[in-house]
Amino acid sequence: MIEIEPRQFRSPGYYIRAASRPFEARGAAALRHRVFVEEQGIFHDHDRDEIDLIATHLVALSTYAAQSDQIVGTVRIHEEAPRLWWGSRLAVDRGSRSVGQLGTELIRLAVCTANARGCDRFLAHVQSQNVPLFRRLHWRPLEEVELHGVAHVRMEAELAAYPPCADPVAGWYRRTPAREKVTA
């Protein structure tokens, strides 16, 4: 019997776009369940709520042989009131967190999409450990809050740093830099 050792490989890149196919929606829901229910224990059974019915769901898809492979990141956005938008449920698969920029790219698409839809204000409740990332991405903290027993900071995006993205389904492709590797 020949034993094969795990090899280092890298996805050539990632599509960052709005979920438009059933497998993308299912993959985003499954990823959120893994992160928020199984891994972090924030929710007991599921993290779904009424916002899921009105939100635009955005995803990061890994690629294999130039084809979409699996959902490795997600976030959702919704308009709470005219011109007031929120981002929520940002999640990146544990195995893909070493791939830099996936969360950043999802945040960027979220705010750029809302900006194209007439957003005057974009807010999010950010887990406290993620505040430094959001600050680097031109967000400012507004107030500390506790949600579902977890410390968060309500933050606001500086919209001028996020040009409008009129076609979030097309989104964009982010090539993986040579130094970023993922193990199988």
Image (cartoon, rainbow, N blue to C red):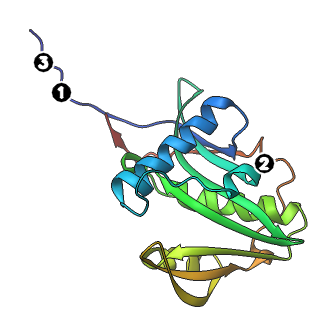
x, y percentage for residue 148?
Answer: 47, 72
Q: Position of residue 167 (x, y in %)?
A: 84, 47
Dot 2: few (<14), some (14–19), or many (≥20) neighbours within 10 Å?
many
Q: Are marks 1 and 3 in contact (CB under 8 Å)?
A: yes
Which of the two marks, 3 or 2, is nearer to us in this view? Answer: 2
- The residue under label 1 is 5
Relative horizontal placement of residue 112, taking residue 31 as reference (left or right): right
Most extreme residue toward the bottom is 143
Tell me if residue 98 can be seen.
no
Q: Earlier in the sequence, mark 2 or mark 1?
A: 1
Q: Nearer the viewer, mark 2 or mark 1?
A: 2
- Which quadrant, please, contains the N terminus? top left
Question: What amino acid type should be assigned to the residue bearing mark 3?
Answer: Glu
Where in the figure is residue 10, as x and y percent of width and height? 42, 37
Please tell me the numbered disc located at residue 168: 2
Give me the residue at 73% from left, 36% from top.
20
In the image, taking residue 61 as reference, residue 54 lies left or right, namely: right
Q: Which mark is residue 3?
A: 3
How far, Cα to Cα, is label 3 from label 2?
Answer: 44 Å
Q: Amino acid at mark 1?
A: Glu
Q: Quadrant of residue 122?
A: bottom right
Which residue corresponds to the image point at 49% horizontal and 41% vertical from the top-left? 30
Q: Secondary structure at mark 2?
A: loop
> Mark 3 or 2 closer to N-term?
3
Residue 181 to residue 118: above or below = above
